[in-house]
Image (spheres, grey):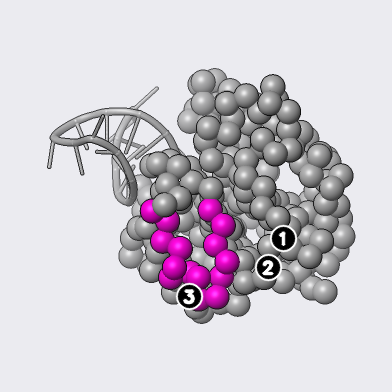
Amino acid sequence: MKIATWNVNSIRTRQDQVLGWLQGQDIDVLCLQETKVIDQDFPRSPFEELGYHVYIYGQKAYNGVAIFSRLNIESIIMGFTPILSADKVGDLDDQKRVIAGVIDDICIINVYIPNGSSVGSDKYEYKLQWLNRLRDYLQQMLIKYPHLCICGDFNIAPEDRDIYNPQNRENHIMASAAERQALDAIANLGLADGFRKFTQDGGHFTWWDYRAASFTRNRGWRIDHHYLSPGLYENAIACYIDTEPRTQPKPSDHAPVILEIGT
DNA sequence: ATGGCTTGGCTCCCAAGA
């Protein structure tokens, strides 16, 4: 099974690129982030005509996640609300950032973790709170679904080798100690970074700033990930970043990441 | 360079992204 994740930065703007990319690949499940569209305006039919079931959880202008799957999805879980108590969820589901689906006995969770703006800001506190709730959510999900893959835009570079220029990043958003600790707490539930099973060196990135010709200079960050429960991690046979879509005109600022799991 | 692009929105500038 091939499970891909891609922050497309507006599905309506990127529709043709995503379609073209899917036609040239052999993707079973594609997890999208930043679809930036309400559900009734989501361009479902072009993807359905390609053979994908389309599951969407969106809102106006910001955020929004979706799962395209060639395989039947048994149950879809949108937001934290179906899993966590109302006092734990609070208003966190106002922003549409998490959708999960179960295929056979594998649970695939698609997340768009908040950006956080800058260290110490209100949005930064929101990001840390969201990560705490995500940990609670995953703890519950792992009880129901021990075979679990969580993927998406994490907006966190786990280690210095995941940043083109890691110096003086301790107060930088996506690299601060509190963000990395929150991610560690999630990994400590028993989840491991699929990409790092296969690749140890730095210089591999999934996001490049639109400004300052960052992509052509490979000034990027690795912030899009697949984290896997032990059985899936063992069965993973490849995990790689496809930078080709990032070279095209009017690209997303993120590249897709593909994980392959053997049987 | 509190900058540099790109997106969507009660658009002709602004917020947000990362």
Q: Quadrant of residue B14?
A: top left
Q: Do pointers 1 and 2 mark residues of a single chain?
A: yes
Q: Looking at the image, do the residues carrying marks 1 and 3 touch, with CB atoms under 8 Å apart?
A: no
Q: Quadrant of residue A11?
A: bottom left
Q: Position of residue A82 (x, y in %)?
A: 70, 39
How many callouts does the rendering have? 3
Query: Which dot marks residue A74?
Result: 1
Q: Camera-side residue: A198 or A138? A: A138
Q: Write down the residue under mark 2.
A: A72
Cα–Cα span, label 3 and label 2: 15 Å
Q: Looking at the image, do the residues carrying marks 1 and 2 touch, with CB atoms under 8 Å apart?
A: yes
The C terminus of chain A: image quadrant = bottom right
Q: Write down the residue under mark 3.
A: A49
Going 56% across and 57% down the picture, which residue do you hit? A55
Mark 2 belongs to chain:
A
Left or right: where A195 falls relative to A147: left
Labels 3 and 2: the sequence-earlier one: 3
How many C-alpha atoms fall within 10 Å of the one at disc 3: few (<14), some, or many (≥20)?
Answer: few
Cα–Cα span, label 1 and label 3: 20 Å
Q: Camera-side residue: A248 or A140? A: A140
| Three-letter code, disc 3 | Glu
Q: Position of residue B4 (x, y in %)?
A: 29, 43
Magenta residues (range): A41-56
Going 40% across and 41% down the picture, which residue do you hit? A60
